Amino acid sequence: MYALHGVGVPGEEEKSGKRKKKEPESEFTKAKNIVLNQLAMAPRSRAQLAKKLADREISEETAEDILSRFEAVNLINDAEFAEVYVRTRANVKKLSKNAIRRELKQKGVEGEAAEVALEQRSDEDERSDAHALVAKKLRPSMDFSDRKEKDKIMRRLVGMLARKGYPPSMAFGVVKDEIERYVQENGLDATSDDDYYF
């Protein structure tokens, strides 16, 4: 038996589940791991990563060093981030360029990097997406022959497009066109839009 004070039986630490304490992680290593974990989850802008490091109380100097190193090896690239972000938000959420521009700014990407990425979206792309969004919402149960009901449907659809960043004039025109198309294709009764003002 071991009778010396402070000395345990060999292997007892492992049995009790206690492990030797690890050396404390350096701030640099901690920062590097934070950035790697963030990038493993999803692409991030430099500003998003800088905020995450600040939230985790990494010094500004260490954060700047780590972010610059990651940028140097192209693991952080705001221009590429913006390209992918614009494509994803346009294809998945059908957001307008204005809405995507605002979101990029919130993520710390603006100016040339944002504008170059937004060039991949044409006005025709936006109009086409707006038509697709409205067409998806039209239902046979909607009553376009009742003026009040039609007005309510139009306001709701224009509002939906506005929340996605489409300008009011485009939103109203698209909704009007889609309702007319839907009514014609389905042989429905509808009130005239001649005296309709939004």
Image (cartoon, rainbow, N blue to C red):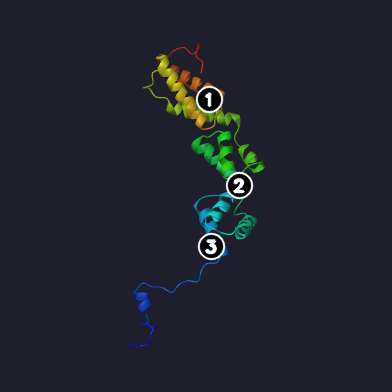
Estimate how packed mark 1 is, as few (under 14), some (14 to 19) or many (20 or more) residues with alpha carbons within 10 Å.
many
Cα–Cα span, label 2 and label 3: 26 Å
**Would you name the residue on which mark 1 appears?**
171
- N-terminal of the pair, mark 1 or mark 2, is 2
Front position among marks 2 and 3: 3
In the foreground, 97 or 83: 97
- Inspect the image, locate mark 3, and give the three-letter code of the amino acid beneath it: Lys
Question: Mark 3 and mark 2 in contact (Cβ < 8 Å)?
Answer: no
Cα–Cα span, label 3 and label 1: 48 Å
- Inspect the image, locate mark 1, and give the three-letter code of the amino acid beneath it: Ala
| Residue 21 image-quadrant placement | bottom left
Residue furthest to the left: 1
Identify the mark at residue 30; answer none if there is no mark.
Answer: 3
Q: Is residue 23 above or below residue 133?
A: below
Point 50% across, 29% down: residue = 161
**Would you name the residue on which mark 2 appears?**
80
Q: Is residue 5 above or below residue 131?
A: below
Quadrant holding the N terminus? bottom left
Estimate how packed mark 3 is, as few (under 14), some (14 to 19) or many (20 or more) residues with alpha carbons within 10 Å.
some
Q: Secondary structure at mark 3?
A: helix
In the foreground, 104 or 94: 104
Q: Secondary structure at mark 1?
A: helix
Q: Is residue 6 above or below residue 148?
A: below
Q: Position of residue 157 (x, y in %)?
A: 46, 25
- Inspect the image, locate mark 2, and give the three-letter code of the amino acid beneath it: Glu
